[in-house]
Amino acid sequence: MKIIAKTDIGCVRSTNEDTYTIKIKDNNNFLAFTCDGMGGHLGGAFAANKTVEFLNQGFEQLDPKNPPKNIGVWLFETLQNANTFVYEESLKDENLKGMGTTVTGVVMINKEIFYAHIGDSRIYLYDDNSIEQVTTDHTYVNTLLLNGLISYKSAAKHPKRHVLTNALGIKRNVSVDIGQIKLNEKENILICTDGLHTMLDNRKILKTILEVDSTEERVDNLLNKALNAGGTDNITLILLEQ
């Protein structure tokens, strides 16, 4: 699987609080995650970078020949450890108060792919004909939408559409969506922060991907289209293509 990622400050923000990590042991064992920090430049970037450190360390210590019995539990425990660290640091330092981060990504262990998700970054599955969102946005507006209290049209312009209902580091215990992904032969994975999917809807994302042939060109094309659409936030994306 080919894995290519990019991050960009965007056209409006003065700092980039997004970060990502890609760690590859071999063709059947890798990790790919993105984090979108919140809580001001110092706090948001700190939370995102520390979470990536916990993911990297956990993956480096993992032995594919003797993997954890339950990868979902391993992912949860890794992110809970990161959550505890970030939350406790926020209580110690006034400059870090209120910080947190989204966390979204996948890990492949011995050809099996699992995902973990907190916040409003997204994982998509796509092929030449369709694109499907795997994750559920942890936002106030999405909660209203799922409960039938507002329409899709209203959700797109709602003043609180960026308000998160879940993030790593904001409470002592974190809630994590965890699941398994089974790829069909021609399916690929896109992981991205909201800086991409708020600029390009699902239809435009797929169209942009299919305009060019290579994974590298697709990453560049998605980033450039999001910037041209306004680039109102930091933009980070990871493509994983078979």
Image: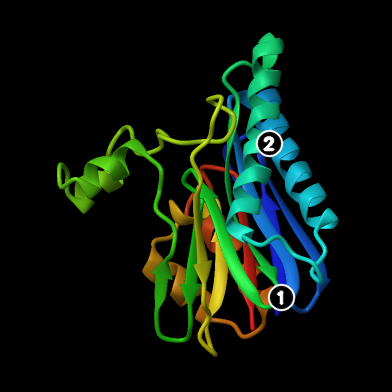
Q: Given the image, on which type of amino acid does mark 2 rest? A: Asn
Expressed as whole percent of the image width and height from the top left, the position of residue 141 reads: 30, 40
The residue sitting at 84% across, 56% down in the picture is 60
Q: Residue at x 72, y 62 (%)?
A: 31
Quarter where residue 212 is shown = bottom right
Residue density around tag 1, few if under 14, some if 14–19, many if 20 or more, within 10 Å: some
Distance from label 2 to label 1 (Cα)? 24 Å
Q: For the point 72% across and 30% down, which residue is it? A: 46
Q: Is residue 27 left or right of residue 167?
A: right
Residue 36 disc label: none
Is 151 located above or below residue 27 in the figure? Answer: above
Q: Who is closer to the viewer here, 115 or 46?
A: 115
Tag 2 near tag 1, CB within 8 Å: no
Q: Is residue 92 left or right of residue 218?
A: right
Please say if 93 is above or below 131: above
Q: Pointer 2: what residue?
A: 81
Q: Which colouring convention does the figure follow?
A: rainbow
Q: Name the secondary structure under disc 1.
A: loop
Vertical comparison of 228 with 148: above or below? below
Q: Quadrant of residue 158?
A: top left
On the image, numbered disc 1 is attached to which residue? 110
Q: Label 2: few (<14), some or many (≥20) within 10 Å? A: some
| Number of numbered discs on residues | 2
Near-viewer residue (73 or 113): 73
Q: Quadrant of the C terminus?
A: bottom right
Which sits earlier in the primary sequence, circle 2 or circle 1? 2
Quarter placement of the N terminus: bottom right
> Residue 144 location, x and y as percent?
23, 41
Q: Secondary structure at mark 2?
A: helix
